[in-house]
């Protein structure tokens, strides 16, 4: 057999197979049957995850975000005393109530009171959310402790001792 006859034979075979598939029942032979309606379950849309940024160029930052690494802490001390006193604000401490152990090498601010008053603003790193203020009196009276904690509800953070 040559190549042309083989191609004709294959075409004839394919057409005969296609014509054999098809057809079906005659419309007059169809009988009615009661089949329950098929219920398709509700399809919930897939939640697409937000793509993880792979570089700084991929980050979307809200224009209102000021990206500050520090915040202002207002210190307002006004004690009714003519005693000389000194104030320290530190971040490393342990203890509770009136028994504290303070690492004075970790102080963020130190300064004297003038006639029982000290008013200043300092910049504090964002990771500092809890500090201890220690009020020292020069006449050997026990120091006074004040714990300050960052308050997310306040726009201006304030440490007050009265």
Image (cartoon, rainbow, N blue to C red):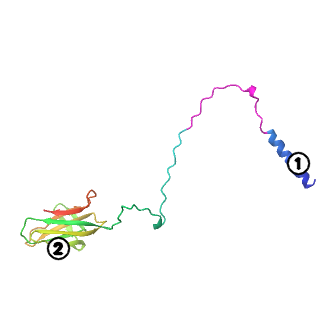
* Number of numbered callouts drawn: 2
What residue range appears in magenta? 21-40
Residue 48 placement (x, y as % from top left): 50, 52
Q: Is residue 19 left or right of residue 124?
A: right
Q: Is residue 25 left or right of residue 127?
A: right
- Neighbourhood count class around disc 1 (C-alpha, 10 Å): few under 14, some 14–19, many 20 upward: few
Residue found at x 23% / y 74%:
105
Is 126 located above or below residue 2 in the figure? below
- Front residue of 69/131: it is 69
Magenta segment main secondary structure: loop
Residue 9 is marked as: 1
3D distance between C-alphas at marks 2 and 1:
106 Å
On whether residue 25 falls in the magenta region, the answer is yes
Residue found at x 23% / y 70%:
122
Q: Disc 2 marks which residue?
A: 111
Residue 156 placement (x, y as % from top left): 24, 62
């Amino acid at each position: 057999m040559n190549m042309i006859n083989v191609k004709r034979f294959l075409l004839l075979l394919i057409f005969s197979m296609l014509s054999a598939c098809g057809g079906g029942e005659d419309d007059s032979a169809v009988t009615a049957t009661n089949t329950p309606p098929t219920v398709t379950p509700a399809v919930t849309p897939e939640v697409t995850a937000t793509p993880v940024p792979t570089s700084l160029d991929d980050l979307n930052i809200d224009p209102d975000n000021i990206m500050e690494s520090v915040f202002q802490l207002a210190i307002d001390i006004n004690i009714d005393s003519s005693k000389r006193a000194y104030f320290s604000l530190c971040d490393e401490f342990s203890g509770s109530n009136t028994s504290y152990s303070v690492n004075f090498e970790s102080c963020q601010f130190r300064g004297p009171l003038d006639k029982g008053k000290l008013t200043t603003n300092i910049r504090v790193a964002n990771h500092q959310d809890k500090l201890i203020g220690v009020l020292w009196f020069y006449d050997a009276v026990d120091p006074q402790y004040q714990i300050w904690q960052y308050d997310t509800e306040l726009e201006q953070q304030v440490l007050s001792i009265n």
